[in-house]
Amino acid sequence: MAKLRHCFTILLLLFTAESAHSDFFTSIGEFLLPQNCLSPHVNCVFCFVFFPSGHMTDLLFVERDLVSSLKDYIRAEENKLQRIKRWAERLDVLSTAGSQDPEGFLGHPVNAFKLIKRLNTEWAELESLVLTDVSDAFVSNLTIQRQHFPKDDDQIGAAKALMRLQDTYELDTETISSGRLPGHSVLIVEDCYDLGKVAYSDVDYYHTELWMAQALKQLEQGEESSAVDAIAILDYLSYSVYQQGELERALEFTKKLLELDPSHQRANGNLKYFEYQLSKQMKLEVDDDDEEKRRMQKENRGRRDDYLPERKQYEKLCRGEGVRMTPRRQSRLFCRYYDNGRHPRFVIGPLKQEDEWDSPQIVRYHDIVSDRDMEKVKELAKPRLRRATVHDPQTGTLTTAHYRVSKSAWLGAYEHPVVDKINRKIEDITGLDVSTAEDLQVANYGVGGQYEPHFDFGRKDEPDAFEELGTGNRIATWLLYMSDVQAGGATVFTDIGAAVQPKKGSAVFWFNLYPSGEGDYRTRHAACPVLLGNKWVSNKWIHERGQEFRRRCGLHWTD
């Protein structure tokens, strides 16, 4: 206490004495303390320090500045929460609309693409936004759920599906982007840009140009974008048109880019190169072969060495064009009640049979399976749906293929009474033995889902086709439509120019082989891409074994 009183005494004397010794003080920032009170040998537990009012005012402003910074931090947090809230409200609207009719909602190509894009890209951005200590539960849940999220390959696949629809149904980018398709879902600048990048990565400069041009158009029309600018778009545009042989347009886009960014290194280099090539081209006569090559490239929509010779016919039929049914032939097609030779099952309740085509004969049976049974089949198949496979003629095994884009599952008759019931009904209607047939294959074609032209039967150049089954070739095909499709999804026969539209509850049937056992090449068919909606079908491929006395052989090749 004596030492403490000594400190106070010294302080009071110093503040009142006019002749205070300046060397008695030391400065620690803005604080002035007596030297001996800082000494470890002096007990200053209760040494008060007095400050000039000017210094206190400065501290007030310091505190005010700290409070202001604190409020800025709070506003930043609130702004972050508001952004998350707006994001959540937007997704709530989308998920509510989608959950009311999931298949219908995802049946729209833009909805399917944007769902995959959101889950693959935007949710990662949201994770970065909310990655704070209080968000541990959310991040943990997101991490767990991410294993089920689409990957980059899925986003690329969805983008290619949109471009496939664009080509098949001759849709321009404006129609897709502006929401003119039923459902009115739109693509923003970033969406168009991402589609262009997918095409670019696939060396598809035709679609790169189309989608980058659409992205640029939307920017120029005033649409705002924080992720994409005109410079990046023009960079892709100039190169994509150059790759298609259009030097003048490439030069035009490059100059436009340099107006926005004069220091752009690649554009400055391209400018000189394009100008040199253009001057060189003007001195030489235009090569007719090069012009024809460029024309064909445009006509083929940038496709490289198309493996599908009948693609134009296939796409025309998908659009409802090129059907070769004349009025005279049409007049010979009928609807009738069918009892399959007074089969006991159909004597009292005959089937409604409709001729879809005359040669080869393709018939449709209406109202074959109830809605309840079809839903049960879907329910059984959904957990097992996997990427659909095709028969590899080289290896004799089933494998995935780029020309078949769907998911499928196989259901055996023993798995559920509904499957057995469908199998028995197929046998009763067709008169063929289904005990040697393949299991019921259930397929789901989502947006852009398709199966390009193919044969169901094994050809002579495929000697090992279905050998492992030991039941011979596929003699006939039964195709049951288990959903209606808003647009697209027709089954088309490219050789004969026929198109069969999906109708829920109906089934179409045709023979793949002549009675002689030779393949009927007129049955080459395809499943058109689904433009709007969701297509569910089930196939029953019936084999030769067991049909010896049910469909007798013919003496001639086409008998």
Image (cartoon, rainbow, N blue to C red):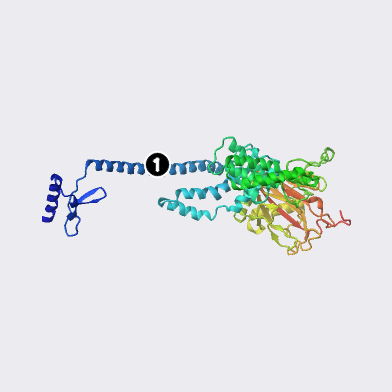
Q: Is residue 379 visible?
A: no
Q: Is residue 405 visible?
A: yes
Residue at horizontal 21%, vertical 43%?
Answer: 52
**Where, quadrant-wise, is the N terminus in this rendering?**
bottom left
Q: Is residue 322 above or below residue 35?
A: above
Question: Circle 1 is placed at which residue position?
Answer: 75
Disc 1 on helix, strand or loop? helix
Left-right relation of 269 to 518:
left
Q: How many marks?
A: 1
**Where, quadrant-wise, is the C terminus in this rendering?**
bottom right
Q: Nearer the viewer, residue 230 or 80?
A: 230
Q: Position of residue 183 (x, y in %)?
A: 61, 38
Q: Position of residue 544 (x, y in %)?
A: 78, 59
Q: Position of residue 104 (x, y in %)?
A: 61, 43
Left-right relation of 58 to 330:
left
Q: Residue furthest right?
A: 556
Left-right relation of 371 to 429:
left
Q: Nearer the viewer, residue 146 or 218?
A: 218
